[in-house]
Image (cartoon, grey):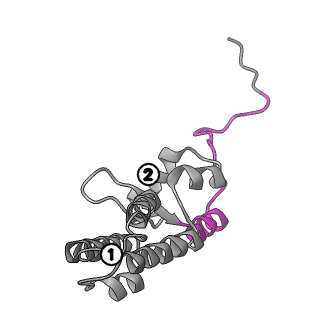
Amino acid sequence: MRAWLRKQINELSAFLGHPEPDEPLFEGCAAIVREAADRAAKAGMLDFYEQHKRVRTCTPRDAVAVLNSMLASLSNEEYLTPPEAARLLGVNPDKVRNWIRSGRLPAIDTAKKTRPRWKIARTDVENLRQTATPLGRRSTHSRDPSVTKYF
């Protein structure tokens, strides 16, 4: 979502120096802000969604300000991707995805109609790390230390 926001900010910034943008551009800016609000809702930022879901017109400068505030709030939020969470937990990213699918690790799917793109709160990863049993492979059978194996 950050990449999308940066792209929209860059595109709208080109119009900031324009002396008098036309009305359809204003409607286009509002459409971008509404799209950002929808994406914010999927990312769990419901306050941003409620504040900007009904925007009908806005200037490019206002739209850039809104998108910058959303980008800043995303940066302040401590969300991780499955590979980042896996590094913190010392496991494979596939294991983190399995925990998400099983419900053991809460996450938000930020994708629209494509494969899942998970966003995991750092606090949830920390809670899992504190409450989880030691991670890693465990033997399925006990070994007698007095037995020597020869191969």
The amino acid sitting under disc 1 is Val
Residue drawn 27% across and 84% down? Answer: 55
Residue drawn 43% across and 66% down? Answer: 13
Check if residue 85 falls in the magenta segment: no
Q: Which residue is mark 2?
A: 98
Relative image position of residue 12 (x, y in whole percent)? 38, 66
Q: Secondary structure at mark 2?
A: helix
Position of residue 95 relative to residue 34, above or below, is: above
Q: Which residue is mark 1?
A: 33
Structural crowding at the residue carrying mark 2, measured as other residues with C-alpha within 10 Å and reported as few (<14), some (14–19) or many (≥20): few
Identity of the residue furthest to the front in this view? 19
Check if residue 129 falls in the magenta segment: yes
Foreground residue among 2 and 142: 2
Q: CA distance from mark 2 to mark 1?
A: 34 Å
Lower sequence index among marks 2 and 1: 1
Residue 121, disc = none
Residue drawn 62% across and 39% down? Answer: 139
Identity of the residue furthest to the right in this view? 146
Structural crowding at the residue carrying mark 1, measured as other residues with C-alpha within 10 Å and reported as few (<14), some (14–19) or many (≥20): many
The amino acid sitting under disc 2 is Asn
Position of residue 58 relative to residue 104, above or below, is: below
Q: Secondary structure at mark 1?
A: helix
Position of residue 6 relative to residue 52, above or below, is: above
Relative image position of residue 106 (x, y in whole percent)? 46, 67
Q: Quadrant of the C terminus?
A: top right
Q: Quadrant of residue 19?
A: bottom left
In this image, 107 relative to 32: left or right?
A: right
Relative image position of residue 102 (x, y in whole percent)? 40, 59
Relative image position of residue 90 (x, y in whole percent)? 65, 49
Magenta part of the protein: which range? 121-146
